[in-house]
Image (cartoon, coloured by chain):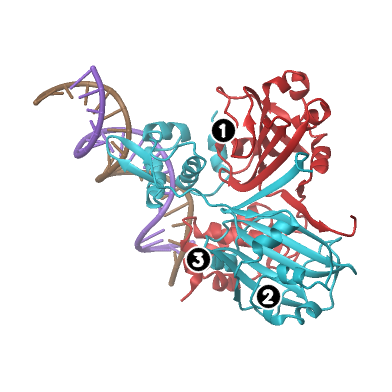
Chain colours: A cyan, B red, C brown, D purple
Amino acid sequence: MSTLAETYKRSPIPLYLQVAAALRRRIETGHWEPGEKISTLEELEIEFQVARVTVRQAIDLLQKEGLVRRQQGKGTFVARNIRDKHWLRLETEWPALISTIKDNVPRFVPVKNPAPEPRLAPGEGRPAQSYKFLRSVQSRDREPFAVAGVHIARHVYERAPKAFGSRTALPILVEMNDVAIARAHQTLVIGAADAETAELLEIPLNAPTAEAHCVAVDEEGVAVYVADITYRGDCVKLDINLFDRSKR
Amino acid sequence: MSTLAETYKRSPIPLYLQVAAALRRRIETGHWEPGEKISTLEELEIEFQVARVTVRQAIDLLQKEGLVRRQQGKGTFVARNIRDKHWLRLETEWPALISTIKDNVPRFVPVKNPAPEPRLAPGEGRPAQSYKFLRSVQSRDREPFAVAGVHIARHVYERAPKAFGSRTALPILVEMNDVAIARAHQTLVIGAADAETAELLEIPLNAPTAEAHCVAVDEEGVAVYVADITYRGDCVKLDINLFDRSKR
DNA sequence: CTCAATTTGTTCGTATGTATG
DNA sequence: ACATACATACGAACAAATTGA
């Protein structure tokens, strides 16, 4: 028995969209190179076990997206001018992290009242008495790639409110050489865009996202910086250096 | 004008599924606690700007999933027995990584011929002359959470074929104290499950995944271990230690 | 040039799913 | 619960373009 049908049924999403996503992926991963001919309708309808019209509907979508070009009697071909995915590297080491975000220019967006409380997991430090909450959208080439919700301990914020209102917060914190950061860490999970995030990032509702939760703790164990950053899932790439004996 | 409609239109996915996913997420993130009453149909139809029947349809789904319980005349309530999401921590540091995967018991699955060539990005080392390719499913509590495709340099594999056929490869490599690993690194992106992965992981086609690409290089600069591991997106959590002056 | 094989394009009928008011 | 409109999915048949024998 075909287990493919079971896989389809696991999702309530229309068949042609499931097929389209599978084909899109083959193109993105290079399974089919730019300019190359993809499988024929007949091969695809057999492989995916769906009707001819359904495969066509899926390919219609890809054509609208500019991913493929069709030619009657010849076949369907991957477009030649696919811009290779430009990844946004999320840094996993402190100095690199700071230096990459230093020059980001966030667009600050109004905060709905009341401002949310920072979520602090056990071991992420004691909360400060009060926080200033800022919300901003980070863009590159006019395209938004992340929304950040940042809590800054009030006593830290008050020392440079203008700076915090115009630049990303972490580098400012680092430059304050009398606010010593003792520890910083970050967790990362895969999530999905809620309505507000989807609108700010210009992505579909529930599109996959990377949700970073970043906390910096001062020498008294107080969490002076608590950020929740939601990245577009389709552009982030983590590069983790596990081990390097050659340099050390 | 409502920008919500635009957000909906960005996705071809049926409205009630988009709404269902949004509600599901509120429950999973704890926006609505177990046992708590969720918004009324009327509130939801206003918030999401859809017809009442569409909201009902969305909630029907959640009820089938066992996430909510409805009571005529009272409201809809979050189920009390939602098992809290148990995250699978992906380690980002070498010793922790090795020790956590050391005791994993993979289930090896047949490899389709021909075995794929390892993908090596620039800077990831020279390829070995030949590789042995193994494919396995990793599970926890009987639930599969990752599929791994592992390339092991042939000359390394031949020294302990039985071990490589029954345990995870990295710890075996580490134990071979004459095969010196000079560098190891890992990249991580968000992907989507293809048909084969979906079936092995028992998730819907195109469900979000975390795709890890892990490479270990020996002292001659040869990539002796190249793994592509696909994790279920709904269970992985990265914990990245950015900075810790308190211990060092 | 013609013919056949291949491949995409189009249409029809039917059944079911989605969304509204 | 009902009536309505449109979308999704199937199978089948036929049309049109391309290719090579």
Residue type indicated by callout 2: Leu
User: Which element is circle 3 on?
Assistant: loop
Seen from the viewer's position, the closer of residues A67 and A216 is: A216
Tell me, for residue A134, which label it has, or none.
2
Residue identifier under label 3: A142
Seen from the viewer's position, the closer of residues B82 and B126 is: B126
Q: Where's residue A58, x and y in %? A: 42, 45
For mark 2, name the chain.
Answer: A
Dividing the picture into quadrants, the one containing residue A224 is bottom right
The Cα atoms of the two marked residues, 2 and 1, are separated by 49 Å
Residue type indicated by callout 3: Arg
Residue identifier under label 1: A3
**Labels 3, 1: front one:** 3
**Labels 3, 2: front one:** 3
Dividing the picture into quadrants, the one containing residue B161 is top right
Q: Residue at the location (66% across, 66% down)? A: A102
